[in-house]
Amino acid sequence: MAGLDDPRRRRALTRAGLLDPHPDETLDRLAEEVRETLRAPVATVTIIEPERQLFPGASGLDEPWMTKRETPISYSLCQHCVLSGQPFVVDDARRHPLTKDSPAIAELGVVAYAGVPIVSPDGVVLGTICAIDHEPRSWNDDDIAELRRLAGGALQEIARRTAVEAVSGGLNISALAHRTGVAADTLRKWEHRYDVIHPLRTSGGQRRYNEQDVARVEWLRDRLAEGYRIGEAAALLGSGTEEEPRRSTDEFVEGILAAAAAGDAHGVHRLVAQSFALHPVARAVEQVVEPALKRVGDAWEDGRLSVAQEHLVTQAIRARLEGLLVSADTGVRGRAVAACAPGERHDIGLMCVALMLGADGWQVTYLGADTPVADALALARQIDADVLALSISRSDLARDLEEALADQSVPAKLTLMLGGRGADTTLANRIGARCSEDARTVVDDLRARAA
């Protein structure tokens, strides 16, 4: 394991802007979630350097540390987590041989400590996320599991900030203005005054906007056309970073069904776009897209919706997912290839998997419907992928998929994930894959394997 002066860590954190001792709103929220989930008085997201530790994310720290956001390295229990690359758990720091002399016991009130590393796919420990108690405490497996989950959120945020190479394919402000019909000067005002769009920047400092930014601008534009003031519309939309959004996902599902029943194609497209504008990708997929598709399918089967009305919804969702897939950022967990089995034409479920993997920190190459197995495996080898996700909704295609895989050599490092209505554990076992019921299961399974 590399030491505290690992140059790879410093390069990654420099690109993410995390080597200055100042609070970070997103990482502060992660620390607050640690406090609430583990019922701990203090939590931090910590960056370690050879001479100091920084707290870009913190909740519950006493002054002056909450303002300073750094301590000398001699105070650091997190350094042991970084050096080992493993969780570091202390029930009573006053008795542990590595921590009993730490000034953090007296100065910061650290008695019990539990921390897990934030680790990139290539093994670089970027920092830690930890919980601290002022009294002796026995941490359990559930506590460590929650810290691992939240470390994944920190990793995703660092990945977003370091995705400089990926932003070159985004929209500059002129292109965003042309696409949305909102003047560039107005866009700048909305960005700075109301914090409603969040461009990444190229290495030259130029803004690049993605499809979520487009959706948010279009949503604001539509609200202004309805008579809202920009301040009111921005307050309703929010910054896009709140834990609890300002409009429930259930409202979007009901609205999409109502618009489909009325034959309102524009309304369906608008509601799908707004759901992704108001909610993080994973939440929009799990709580809007997947329930809406199921409800629409049920309504078609019992005759409440026609084929045309069902197509209004699936095409609107497809259009939004395709746009988001094109603008997906580079991930840091690893590389994944997503493809439908040969003969499989239904790919919306696979799109959901690809988007949620991207949101969880994976770099996803999406191949889509009816992909020859040999071609998918060849591309996986070419890009040194870690995962090949295969989707199959028809059980009659299982034999063709099994035979196609039998003729191929699967790289030892490549994890096969199988999902869709036509997938089951029997088929998965025969082809050496892991079977997952839905997009969330795929994400959680891969995260658990990497832990």
Image: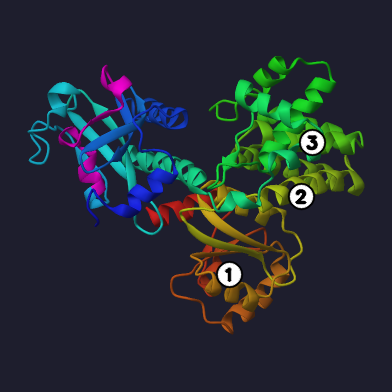
Q: Is residue 311 magenta?
A: no
Residue count near mark 2 (Cα–Cα under 10 Å), binned few <14, some 14–19, many ≥20: some
Q: Which residue is mark 1?
A: 427
Looking at the rendered structure, the kind of residue marked 3 is: Thr
From the image, state whether disc 2 or disc 1 is nearer to you: 2
Q: Which mark is residue 54?
A: none
Numbered-mark total: 3
Q: Which residues are magenta?
A: 60-82
Kindly indicate the quadrant of the structure image that contains residue 212: top right
Q: Nearer the viewer, mark 1 or mark 3?
A: 3
x then y, percent, for residue 91: 17, 34
Is 145 placed left or right of 3 in the picture? right
Which numbered disc, 2 or 1, marks the residue that appears first in the sequence? 2
Residue at numbered disc 2? 318
Quadrant in which the N terminus is drawn: bottom left
Q: Residue furthest bottom?
A: 407
Q: Nearer the viewer, residue 357 or 156?
A: 156
User: Could you tell me the amino acid type at mark 1?
Assistant: Leu
User: Is 62 covered by the magenta stretch?
Assistant: yes
The amino acid type found where label 2 is placed reads Arg
Label 1 crowd (10 A; few <14 / some 14-19 / many >=20):
some
Q: Earlier in the sequence, mark 2 or mark 3?
A: 3
User: Where's residue 343, x and y in %?
Assistant: 75, 71
Find the distance from the CA under tag 2 to the CA under tag 3. Answer: 20 Å
Label disc, if present, on residue 180 of the rendered structure: 3
Q: Mark 2: which secondary structure? A: helix
